[in-house]
Amino acid sequence: MRSLIVCLCAATILTAARPVSAAESDRPNVVIILADDLGYGDPQCYNAESKIPTPNIDRLAAQGLRFTDAHTPSSVCTPTRYTLLTGRYCWRTRLTSGVLDGFSPPLIESDRPTIASWLHDQGYATGCIGKWHLGMQWTRQDGTPETVDRVPGLHRGGEEINAAVPVTGGPCSVGFDSYFGISASLDMPPLCWMENDRCFPPPDTTVPDAKRELFLTHASGIAHSTFKLDEVLPTLRRKTVDWIERHSAQSPDQPFFLYLPLNSPHLPVAPSQTFLGKSQAGLYGDFVVETDDFVGGVIDVLERTGELTDTLIIFTSDNGGLWHAWEPRETDDLAQYKPTPRAEYTAGFGHHSNAHLRGTKADIYEGGHRVPFLVHWPRGISESQVVDTPVELTDVFATVADMLGRPLPAAAAVDSCSFAPLMGRPRLSRLERQTLVHHSLQGHFAVREEGWKYVEVRGSGGFSTPRKIDPRPGEPSGQLYHLTDDPQETKNLFLERPDQVSRLSQRLDQIRSKPLSTE
């Protein structure tokens, strides 16, 4: 079977790939591996000073495209997943800040095209294995549907949910033929496996809060008594290998889309016994090593089934790393900066998850949303290249459509721009991306264009302090950085360049008022 997995890129790096004939690329396979909270500086191919060995991730980089300026549309989990699958910014939905929990109603609208539903309509087999975290329609003990998105505090326990009742609105309702994984992050109930539209087996107990040093293990709530945190990633690895082997044997001529959203290295940090001590960055580093082993498992099974040469693999992360200590420099906001205990933990090993970047997961700063992004496709990419063209994960959907040579409906992937020319395909109906939009945990916006980055407000909008700054008279009300000259965002030029503030503010308002596809 001829197969492929899609990449985000710009025409300026067309030399990295040779043109692809129609025979070679007819209905290519699409596989995406999405790590959870993996920082820009965790893989050694991005950070020579990383204390974590990542040979399989590095192999993808050494034989493919390594993007140095790739961004998630949000600096937290749920919004990025929504946008990746729909090609539409999540802040256009009801979720304008924060994330969902394990019992939230579905976020993807029932009539919203997804990359899975669209590819299914093109004749693809579609599978999802891993962490969903986009909501499902649960049923309460009294038989009524759950309608509450979140509750005050950390995470609800789910005792009011009848987890024996099948769910709707999950992966199998938005285009996936099959699903195996977990409802949301492992620090929130339900702590049990899900298969297709139900908990399998359903929870049979409740568990109390559990913490281990700096690592939150999980919140209290419903669980299955056999469910083990450190068995989750090995189980996902095994299920992925089985899925590919089974499909290759049973349906060798049918293309497939396989979406692999991992639970790692997100909290709870739970490496399995085999990987303890495999890094020089403590338990977190060991968990990243195990994440790298998952990547190796995918590469190995594709090679074993004869698919690797014709398979394009995307590997990336849903947001920046959490375990990061950044050295403050000069800007006026830095006097209040204080690293988190988690940052100090990894810094104690000499490891910084986001390398040189300012900020962490959840922040509007680069460390919150600039992520590793690797594209591996031996048949289409003739040599490895480092790509500095800015891209977004938002653009996967439109790029896939162009790779198939099939235009998308007007209602699909409305904020997605195509970079299919990288693979020798014409751009059919979507714009080349000129502007990046960033969004923080607290709902703060930033816009990036021509090397300039404008942030509407002061503060990180996420986990780093200061989170929010109320400006005094005469102080800047927002932030402006020239990333070309100042990639660490150390000098706020808001007052010095009112022309750029005005231009980018208007551009952000324009994008918020209508989808990119209508421009």
Image (cartoon, helix red, strand yellow):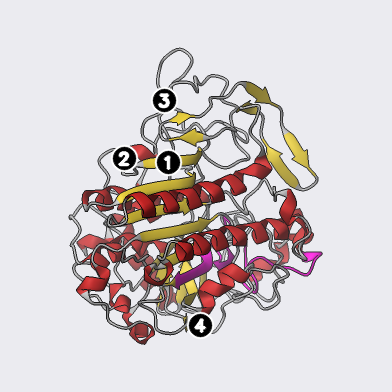
**Amino acid beneath label 3:** Pro
Chain-order first, disc 4 or disc 1: 1
Label pair 4/1, CB-CB below 8 angstroms: no
Q: Nearer the viewer, residue 176 or 101?
A: 176
Give me the C-alpha separation between circle 3 and circle 2.
Answer: 19 Å
Please state which of the two labelled residues, at mark 3 or mark 1, is closer to the viewer: 1
For the C terminus, give its image quadrant.
bottom left
Crowding around mark 1 (Cα neighbors within 10 Å: few <14, some 14 to 19, many 20+) is many
Query: Would you place residue 97 above or below residue 172 in this image?
Result: below
Give me the C-alpha separation between circle 4 and circle 3.
Answer: 51 Å
Inspect this view and state whether residue 288 appears. yes
Crowding around mark 2 (Cα neighbors within 10 Å: few <14, some 14 to 19, many 20+) is few
Chain-order first, disc 4 or disc 2: 2
The residue carrying mark 2 is: 109
The residue carrying mark 1 is: 179
Q: Is residue 361 magenta?
A: yes
Magenta stretch in the rendered image: 347-375
Inspect this view and state whether residue 78 appears. no
Residue 107 placed where, x, y %?
39, 40
Furthest residue toward bottom = 15
For the N terminus, give its image quadrant.
bottom left
Crowding around mark 3 (Cα neighbors within 10 Å: few <14, some 14 to 19, many 20+) is some
**Amino acid beneath label 2:** Glu
As helix, strand or loop, the secondary structure at mark 4 comes to loop
Exactly how many numbered labels are in the figure? 4
